[in-house]
Every structure is written in structure tokens, then in C-alpha cells.
Image (cartoon, rainbow, N blue to C red):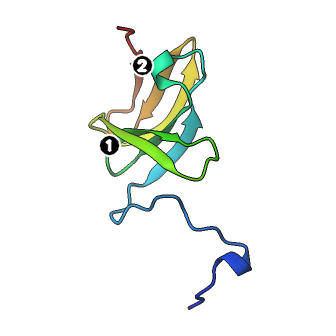
Amino acid sequence: FKKDHYSLGYEEPLLAFTKALGISEIIKTPDSFNSKWKDSYLATSLSAHAILRFNLNNKLDKIQSIEVIKIGERIRDIKFYNNKIYTILENSASLGVYNILSK
């Protein structure tokens, strides 16, 4: 319909998934969480049943890496608390608690 999104105030996404993932939430990991996960963002997916961890460059205009962490259920919500990741899992109506082990 419109060829020039930028002039209309719309900025194209950095990444688009051709099969919709049903992203439910995106959060940034705290710097204190894990040194290997510094400057990471987590996106939860309803249809992919996974958490996507990704890193952006310093300008926040390019994705540098993406990691898919399969959970096996629809993930409705995600939070950090006491250096752990908590998720609300829809299918089993349960709480997922995750910790990253340092090597």
C-alpha cells in the first residue's frame, strides 16, 4: 500500500520471522545475571515454545546473535528475580525456574 514507511514514522523491524512466533514478552537480562549473557535480551514465544536470547550491537540497530532455548510449552510471561529466570507456562499452568550455571 505505502512504499515509504520511514516518512510515515514507521521503522522496519531488525528481524522478522516468516512464521509468526507469537512473541509474548521481551526483557533485558541484568548485567549481574551471567557474564556470558551480558547485554542479552530474552523474548518468549507462544507458538515456538521457546525463549529466544539475542544480542544487539552498540548502536542497537543490528542483531549480532540469536540462541533458541526450547522449553516445550507456550510461554506466557518471563521475569528475573534473585538471579533466576521465571516463566509462566501456559499448557501445564506451571512456573518454570531457570538458572545459568557458570563454567
Q: Vertical placement of 15 versus 81: above or below? A: below
Q: Label 2 to label 1, Cα distance in Å?
A: 15 Å
Q: Which residue does the image show at 40% across and 19% down from the upper left? A: 98
Q: Secondary structure at mark 1?
A: loop
In the picture, the quarter occupied by the N terminus is bottom right
Most foreground residue, 49 or 88 = 49
Q: Quadrant of residue 38?
A: top right
Q: Nearer the viewer, residue 2 or 51?
A: 2
The residue sitting at 67% across, 71% down in the picture is: 10
The residue tagged with tag 2: helix, strand or loop?
strand
- The residue pinned by badge 1 equals 49
**Callout 1 environment at 10 Å: few (<14), some (14 to 19), or many (20+)?**
many
Residue tagged 2: 97
Q: Residue at x 32, y 43 (%)?
A: 49
What amino acid type is highlighted by mark number 2? Val
Badge 2 density bin: few <14, some 14–19, many ≥20, Cα 10 Å = some
Q: How many marks?
A: 2
Q: Is residue 70 above or below residue 1?
A: above
